[in-house]
Image (cartoon, rainbow, N blue to C red):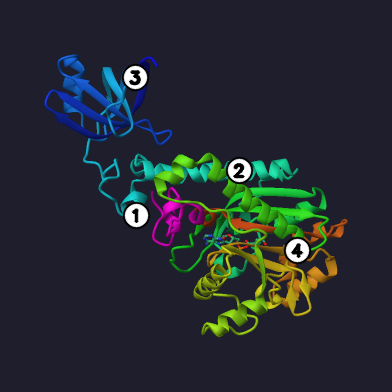
Amino acid sequence: MAEKWIEVSGWVNATRVVGRIAFLEVIDGSELTVYTVVVKRDENPQAWELAARAKVGSAVSVKGFVPDKQISKRGIEVRAREISLVAEPVDYLPLDPSGRTPALLETMMEHRYVALRIPRQRALFRIRALAVKAIREFFEERGFLEVHTPKICGAGAEGGATLFRIDYFGREAYLAQSPQLYKQMLMCGVSKVYEITPYFRAEPFSTSRHLNESWGVDAEMAFISGPEDVMRTLEGLVLHVFERVRSSARAELNELGVELKMPRAPFKRLSYSEALEILKSRGFDVKWGQDLGSDEERVLGEAMREEGYDAYFIVEYPWEAKPFYIMRRGDLSEAFDLDYRGLELASGGQREHRYDKLVENIRLKGLNVDSFSFYLEAFKYGMPPHGGFGLGLDRLIMVITGAQNIREVVLFPRDRQRLVP
Ligand code: AMO
């Protein structure tokens, strides 16, 4: 194999001068590749001068050869013929871009653009981008229409406590908590839709799994025969994303030290009552009808792992624990949650599509029917049985990458403390 000519533009992550040889560790910011640029003073005094003076963090352009025989142990070795300095830092870097000295999450959130020079950090966001691509692939192959619904809304769907209120030319409006109402309304004319979208929620607490702006993958499908149709679609989606990341992000998973296992399928279907029994046997007394808290979810996750399940659905929830739009079956509902090792990834279910029953559900939940009239309107014109789900994208990326904090996989997180950058 002959020497290969190469031109690299990127940033200097580390520098070293050993006698008459200067080394620059350069990344080009695209894939995870690290280039070790080698300049010998005797061969190329001008380039050597520049390399020996180059500061960590500088943007540079390098032209040279990739030698046939690679001596450098790290990255692709480039024998530089020409180096130009494109931009020099005007201040000390806030973190070590080579990643050898670990940075605090706090510092990385503050300077994400510099943190992205660390190969490990880039791996996280490359996996995120690949997962989104895989999600689109999955829906497109199955005939779902990608839609975009409003993010400034006149009514919320997921409860008043987490609504962000805004002044809309003198009227009260809200940032969208989810596309719930709109994706359902669309079921009156389109049979399958999906949306990849931000959710805005005024969650009043700070946890490692909640943000005030998070991203969701929402789907809705009409003419279903029950919630199982929806669960099968969600299960297929999760498996497809895992499979694609495993096959197309080997270098990234390697960089993260993650061995991504396919979750055992079909995912376990665990009823809410069974979940309460398991929790009781482990010292957690949950009153029938209550939603599960994060401690309970974690304990349930441990119990499921002992049975060999990473991913499992919790089905047959009490209706009182679920929103008005979910179909009721006596005291139970047609809702489900999907959890992965104790973290809720998604929830969904079959919806109430019958006009009169839906109005009754809204009343039973103590909500004002008038504020949902625009939504109810769509249920007057041949609304078929339908159901769907909302999958937390940030949480899905967390479990794939093994991140412990949701902020690790979101470029510029919005939490109670953080409004900039
Ligand atoms: P839910 O409120 O359960 O359901 O939200 C769906 C999924 O979105 C993720 N999620 C969040 N992630 C991070 N921070 C938050 N504050 C946050 N809130 C939600 C979770 C959750 O499982 N309309 C229904 C879905 C449906 O029935 O189609 C809904 O929004 O992973």
Task: Rate crowding at label 1 as few (under 14), some (14 to 19) or many (20 or more) other CA atoms within 10 Å.
Answer: some
Quarter of the rendering occupied by the N terminus: top left
**Residue located at (54% from left, 45% from top):** 245
Residue 14 vertical position relative to residue 347 in the rendered view, above or below: above
Magenta part, dominant SS: loop
> Which of the 4 image quadrants contains residue 181?
bottom right
Q: Indicate the secondary structure of the residue bearing disc 4.
A: helix
Residue 149 position, x and y percent, is 66, 49
The residue at the far right in this view is: 382
**Residue located at (18% from left, 32% from top):** 16
Check contact, mark 4 vs mark 3: CB within 8 A.
Answer: no
Q: Which residue is mark 1?
A: 105
Q: Is residue 408 magenta?
A: yes
Task: Rate crowding at label 3 as few (under 14), some (14 to 19) or many (20 or more) other CA atoms within 10 Å.
Answer: few
Question: Amino acid under label 2?
Answer: Ala
Which mark is drawn over residue 68? 3
- Distance from label 4 to label 3 (Cα)? 59 Å
